Amino acid sequence: MPETSTDPSVLTSALTTLAAAPRLLVALDFDGTLAPFADDPSQVGALPGSWAAVLTLQRARDTEVVLVSGRPLEGLARVSHAPEGMALVGSHGVEWRVDGHDEAALSDDELARVARVGAALDAVGARFPDVVIEHKPAGHGVHTRRATAEVAAEANRAAHEAAHEADPEVLERGGKDILEFAVRHVTKGDAVDRLRELRGADAVFFAGDDVTDEDAFRVLRDGDVGVKVGEGDTLAGHRVADPAALTDVLKQLARLRATR
Ligand SMILES: O=P(O)(O)OC[C@H]1O[C@H](O[C@H]2O[C@H](CO)[C@@H](O)[C@H](O)[C@H]2O)[C@H](O)[C@@H](O)[C@@H]1O
């Protein structure tokens, strides 16, 4: 693992250089990064200070903000209240809303696999009352936030077996109190690579809190800035404690970018 700085002055210096880039892409994870966690995934929202900074950044010249989330596109649009015109990437890179155009393009075969895995996970969910199965267009999430650690471990074991039996090719990834299964092997790293290319960005800022965000930190280059929110191993160059601390970082970046 590379060294990750928690020194605010090191981050300020990196942000100052970043803010001078001719074209800047600001890619942001949503849950655990802009929005604190809640038991009910539909009852969350970005912290007001972070969102105000996001909107300031979105208005800044030659700057684009994109939300890159594991949430389904529609759900991401709903909880984020993203303004029309803000690009969104959902389902860990499968679903795209860019330039007012939606893209998911799952094949019939992929859709059949999603349905098969979903049915298998519903059967698991029925055995564990505190476990919620979230169905998404390209996969499913097994939510264990309300379950005890023992029940969560048992449910995750059962979900793993059921999903792989239903579809041996299914992609499994862990997250914060969620085990996810997807039929398309794309990651947030693929999304950041594609966004960088699509927008001709000279530099990228990415912030995220979860293991799936490591795919995005992995594709950052010299001059980019990656900020890990919270604890856990990371490839990011910088770390802040929680979403509230990220608010200050986003405000700082917005100020630097708007006044360059
Ligand atoms: O990539 P993200 O934007 O971080 O999305 C990851 C998952 O977020 C949601 O689940 C997480 O947040 C919930 C609300 O706070 C919480 O209850 C759950 O425990 C977390 O795992 C969302 O429901 C998933 O679809 C996303 O994949």
Image (cartoon, grey):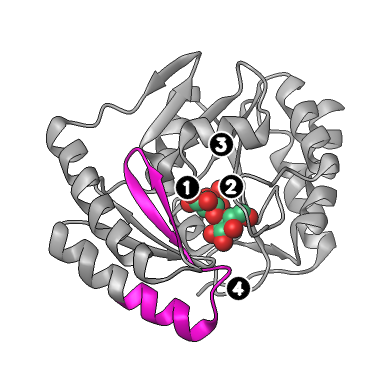
Q: Please state which of the two labelled residues, at mark 2 or mark 1, is closer to the viewer.
A: 1
Q: Amino acid at mark 2?
A: Asp
Residue at horizontal 71 percent and vertical 25 percent from the top: 58
Which residue is labeled 2 in the image?
A: 29
Which residue is labeled 1 in the image?
A: 70
User: Would you say 153 lies left or right of 56 here?
Assistant: left
Q: Earlier in the sequence, mark 2 or mark 1?
A: 2
Q: Earlier in the sequence, mark 1 or mark 4?
A: 4
Residue 66, compared with residue 205, is above or below; it is above
Q: Amino acid at mark 1?
A: Gly
User: Which of the image's four quarters has the C terminus?
Assistant: top right
Q: Amino acid at mark 3?
A: Leu
Which mark is on residue 76?
3
Q: Residue furthest bottom?
A: 150
- Rendering quarter of residue 243: bottom right
The verdict on label 2 being within 8 Å of ligand 1 is: yes
The verdict on label 1 being within 8 Å of ligand 1 is: yes
- Residue 54 pos. (x, y %): 74, 34
Residue 109, compared with residue 60, is above or below; it is below
Q: CA distance from mark 3 to mark 4?
A: 32 Å
Please tell me how crowded label 2 is: few (under 14), some (14-19), or many (20+) other residues with Cα within 10 Å.
many
**Which segment did they paint magenta?**
132-157
Q: CA distance from mark 1 to mark 4?
A: 26 Å
Q: Amino acid at mark 4?
A: Glu
